[in-house]
Amino acid sequence: MGDLTSASPEKPRIVTEHPDFYLVHKPALWLTHRVRSVGVHSGGRVEVPDVLAWMQRETGEPDLSPPHRLDRETSGLLVLSRDTDAARRFFTLFKTHLVGKTYHAIVRGMPDWERRTLDAPLGDLGLGAANRVLMRQAVVPNGRPAVTDFRVLEKRGGHALIEAHPRSGRLHQIRAHLFHLGLPMVGDKIYGPERDAFVEFIETGQTSELTARLGLPRQALHAARIAFPWAGAQMVATVELPEDMRGFWDSLET
């Protein structure tokens, strides 16, 4: 069986250390926090490494807590509060939509627009003959409100590098909205052009053949910037496009 769980050899990296929180760069293929054992190998179930446990060990701070999360395959900026008071303050910031997050994504297709705002409700697609993945979201009339601002940064080789700013925080919002626009994300097993890629991944692992078909071993989505008010100041942090996404982009014909 292929490897379902191998994380990036890259380790989490502290981008900003504040008395109340850390801003950490989460590598792709790391969990935000431990959910459950995943993956089955000949030796039994194995744990996927997670940023929270790693940071707690590295800093010796057991009260670290993530007020938000990034999908396992998504890289980029993650907040970890350092105490319960900071955790409560972040809860309010996220609930009142005062945390601005900007993502970069590489998609298949070259849109004929430079900027676009998609206001389209998202909900569960439901299991059926055309969908074998329970968590897959779709634009549906009775879905929850979801708004994403998109901007094209570059185009090359039948692909586009897109900046996305979600105004709401729905499950898989950017991925589902891009798929709705006909711009599936490179490496995406759930919202890519191969509808059963995720089922194949669960059954066989991330094989080299699957990676070759999808373009990358993970979805090409990166949390590039975060901004929020804190103690009378505006906190802003950015991280560059990671090496795997940059390498894929640079390999495309201009």
Image (cartoon, rainbow, N blue to C red):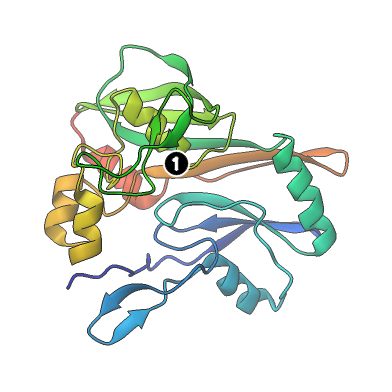
Does residue 161 appear anywhere in the picture?
Answer: no
Q: What is the total number of numbered labels drawn onto the structure image?
A: 1
81 or 194: nearer the viewer: 194
The structure residue drawn at horizontal position 21% and vertical position 50%, both measured from the top left corner, is: 197
Packing grade of label 1 (10 A; few <14, some 14-19, many >=20) is some
Residue 225 picture location, percent across and down: 57, 40
User: Which residue carries the number 1 mark?
Assistant: 172
Does residue 121 appear anywhere in the picture?
Answer: yes
Looking at this view, name the residue that lies furthest to the right. Answer: 232
Looking at this view, name the residue that lies furthest to the left. Answer: 209
Residue 97 picture location, percent across and down: 70, 34
Q: Quadrant of the N terminus?
A: bottom left
174 or 136: nearer the viewer: 136
Looking at the image, is 149 positioned above or below residue 205? above
In the drawing, does residue 133 fall left or right of residue 1? right
| Label 1 residue SS | loop
Quadrant of the rendered image containing residue 15: bottom right
Residue 143 picture location, percent across and down: 49, 29
In the drawing, does residue 43 fall left or right of residue 26? left
Quadrant of the rendered image containing residue 153: top left
The structure residue drawn at horizontal position 20% and vertical position 37%, both measured from the top left corner, is: 193
Residue 54 picture location, percent across and down: 56, 73
Question: What residue type is disc 1 on?
Answer: His
Looking at this view, name the residue that lies furthest to the top. Answer: 112
Q: Quadrant of the C terminus?
A: top left
111 or 170: nearer the viewer: 170
The structure residue drawn at horizontal position 41% and vertical position 49%, both measured from the top left corner, is: 242
The structure residue drawn at horizontal position 37% and vertical position 12%, both measured from the top left corner, is: 113
In the drawing, does residue 153 fall left or right of residue 111? right
